[in-house]
Amino acid sequence: LSDHQLRIICLVITCISLPLNTFCLYLIIAARKIYAPDIFKVTILLQILYMIENVYFTVMFLPFYYGSYGGGYCIGFVCNTKLIPHYALSVIMMSNLSGLFIVLLFFRHQHLMSSPSKLLLGNLASK
């Protein structure tokens, strides 16, 4: 694939996924009453960060990995500006998404546990 073809493919992916992600964000906000407050906050933050990461990776960064070289090659707008921290930003964004997903699982686990459980933490244990 040439760089131009890869840019077109990534822009098409963005044009498809960004409206879907925005609709999912709308659905999360519309169904706010079915979520516990802490789960709602983490879910909203997770969806917003996912939208930002999606635009960053498919428009700004455009990573293109060649397996034979073993390194990363990017052709996005951020790569052309010669900013060194853009690699660190991509790692921070991926780790934030992973961490938020783990926090969401933890909150959900805490809400599903019965009240006399010893594994129930925080204010939920006193209920």
Image (cartoon, rainbow, N blue to C red):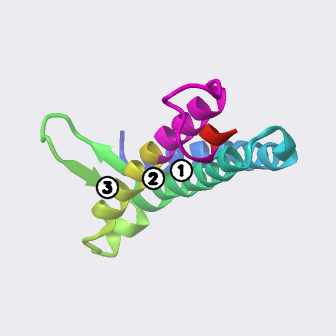
The reply to whether callout 3 and callout 1 are in contact (CB within 8 Å) is: no
State how far apart marks 1 and 2 are (Cα): 5 Å
State how far apart marks 3 and 1 are (Cα): 15 Å
Rendered location of residue 42, percent (x, y): 61, 49
Can residue 75 be seen by looking at this rendering?
no
Closer to the camera, 96 or 8?
Answer: 96
- Mark identifier at residue 109: none
Which residue, given by chain and number where applicable, does mark 3 sit on?
Answer: 74
Task: Tell me the amino acid under the disc marked 2.
Answer: Phe
Which residue, given by chain and number where applicable, does mark 2 sit on?
Answer: 57
3 vs 1, front mark: 1
* Label 2 CA crowd tier, 10 Å (few <14, some 14–19, many 20+): some
Rendered location of residue 5, percent (x, y): 45, 45
Task: Tell me the amino acid under the disc marked 3.
Answer: Cys
Quarter occupied by the C terminus: top right
Can residue 102 be seen by looking at this rendering?
yes
Q: Secondary structure at mark 2?
A: helix
* Mark before the other along the chain sequence, 3 or 2: 2
Which residue, given by chain and number where applicable, does mark 1 sit on?
Answer: 54
Give the side of residue 82 with respect to residue 29, left or right. left
Task: Tell me the amino acid under the disc marked 1.
Answer: Asn
* Label 3 CA crowd tier, 10 Å (few <14, some 14–19, many 20+): some
* Mark before the other along the chain sequence, 3 or 1: 1
Mainly helix, strand or loop, the magenta region? helix
